[in-house]
Amino acid sequence: MNSTSTPTEQLKIVIVGHVDHGKSTFVGRLFHDTGSLPEGKLEQLQKIAERRGVPFEWANLMDALQSERDQNITIDTAQIWFQTKKRQYVIIDAPGHKEFLKNMITGAANAEAALLLIDANEGIQEQSRRHGYLLNLLGIRQIAVLVNKMDLQGYSQERFNQIEKDYRAFLKTIGVEPKLFIPIAAKHGDNIASKSANMTWWQGATVLEALDQFKVSDLPDNQPLRFPIQDVYRFDDRRILAGRIEAGSVKVGDKLLFSPSNKVSTVKTIERWNAPVSESANAGESIGITLTEQIFVERGAVAALETAPPYELNRFKARLFWLGRQPFKQGKIYKLKLATQEADCEIESIEKIIDASTLETISREGEKPYVGRHEVAELTIRTKRAVAFDKHIEIVPTGRFVIVDGFEVSGGGIVAEDNYPKRTSDSLQKSNNIFWSKGKVTAKQRALVNGHSGCVLWLTGLSGAGKSSIANELERELFNIGKHAYVLDGDNIRHGLGSDLGFSPEDRKENIRRVGEVAKLMADAGIICITAFISPYRADRDLVRKMLEGSDNQFVEVYVNAPVEICEQRDPKGLYAKARANEIKEFTGISAPYEAPLRAELELQTSKLTVAESVAKVLDFLNVQDEGTTVSI
């Protein structure tokens, strides 16, 4: 099958299948039928088998070649194993679930097409279904299913048709549409390189014809630049940042943003090893770059053009396939690897668990949620620090990841779609030419029309103290008497404005800062802005107080005071119970501190007061006519 001139087009394929369904036999035969064997290798193995008094097996050929290959190449080096007249083919070896997942997701080898083997004798097995799900999870859409060992079924067309019907039905449920099914007998070479005389009923393509029908994906040059840094080399006074361009292109003079550190510098040179000098590089190339400004960048950083950065968050939604012997549990810390980044992570929440073989939803009511072996989950992962990523449907290499449990790759998946906030290039530019714009309507004019001035009523206290109940009832009472009021609730804010933030002290501070800025604007608009936030740190609340200093609007701190024992008895959302069970980390009052106000304008002891009584106290406070220190409504 070799052509006189070597084709330049190349396609990477992965070959998967249930154990003993004949993958090694198939690959061995494929080498032989395409004339890709080293000279004398077949005869050598046949003589060895004869000397040992055992029959020659094509699988032995695969094993022998694999042994030689393992001694000569590294994990991320691809080797061209065979070719047709149309193109060269690189086989990405996938000896098992774990290796397949690890190699595919970490980007050591990225397949564009797949051959999936099913034994005609044994039929569809659990692993056949799992491999189908994995191919779908990894975004491989060009799939041909090879129904092998047709000789053991007397080359039965009926048997082939039944397997095709059943497996197509399964694949359809997971959104996979295989290009075609082909009946083969790898041991005898039926329908691999030439049509089988034993299956005259088959009028479709051979395996090689099917492979040549697959399309080579265009390199993602037109996507935004993603250049994960693998290592930093120092030569003389130069620091060379080395890695592989996973998407997009880069050229000398480009201004790069390095996530998640958010440092910016400009490309000075592009370095290559044993290659001509060039001032640009594209997706798929392994290069080094030097920068005009020597900033500190280390392995794991992802370089992007400043105008099109990746997402940079500490949580994301994912679809995950779990292979670990131990279940994937909430409350346990794991290692996440995404491109060249590594970060500690944990499950924040599990939305859905699916059996990868049956596609049935698994219910674990009454149990602590976990993902078992060979199960697929839709979940939210939280990392200990921000990581740079993309949605898998947008940029594949930075949209998939693996999870390491101890020292083993135990699962992997893809970043699912969600409304992630993305940093823009403008957010990196700090300008001295920004001034607060004052409108032509004054605060006094608004107060005259509204019948009251704007203010911020900041309700703070433990979860379960009654903040939201009081805030909502207070809003209703103010509305009923014709006042302009609005509640900013903690949970509501975290659905949008604070959706990228966790509950660490740093994230809590940023959450309160954002809310403070919004509350300030609402007060400036003449609205009585009522906030209901735990806001456990005095410094954060004082920060909001300072935001309103010098304005015509007042900050009123309302301490909704209830002992933790009372709050835990109420536990309206079941949060204290989860915190006691260590299912919620950094929970205020249990595993994180609460700093009570030292100078609150108003205190509501809700262990003694009803909601109505608390609201009445706030209204009384607002009605006190002491201009300059209170708000008149």
Image: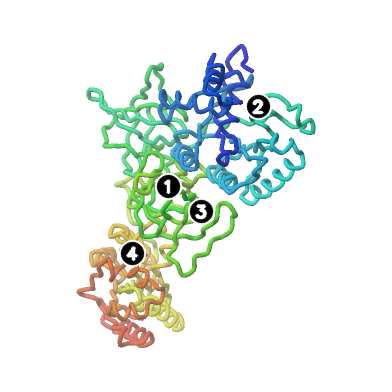
* Dot 2: element: helix
Q: Percent position (x, y) of residue 539?
A: 23, 64
Residue extending furthest right? 201
Can residue 445 be seen in the rendering of this structure? no
- Disc 3 residue type? Glu
Dot 2, crowdedness within 10 Å: few (<14), some or many (≥20)?
A: some
Residue 208 tag number: 2
Number of numbered callouts drawn: 4
Q: Which residue is mark 1?
A: 410
From the image, tell me which residue sits under label 3.
375
> Is residue 373 positioned above or below 591 on the image?
above
Asked if disc 3 and disc 1 are in contact, CB closer than 8 Å, the reply is no
Mark 2 or 4 closer to N-term? 2
Along the viewing direction, whichever of 392 and 441 lies nearer the viewer: 392
Left or right for 31, reference 147: left
| Disc number placed over residue 516 in the picture, else none | 4
Instruction: Work out which quarter of the rendered image holds the C terminus and state it.
Output: bottom left
| The N terminus, quarter of image | top right
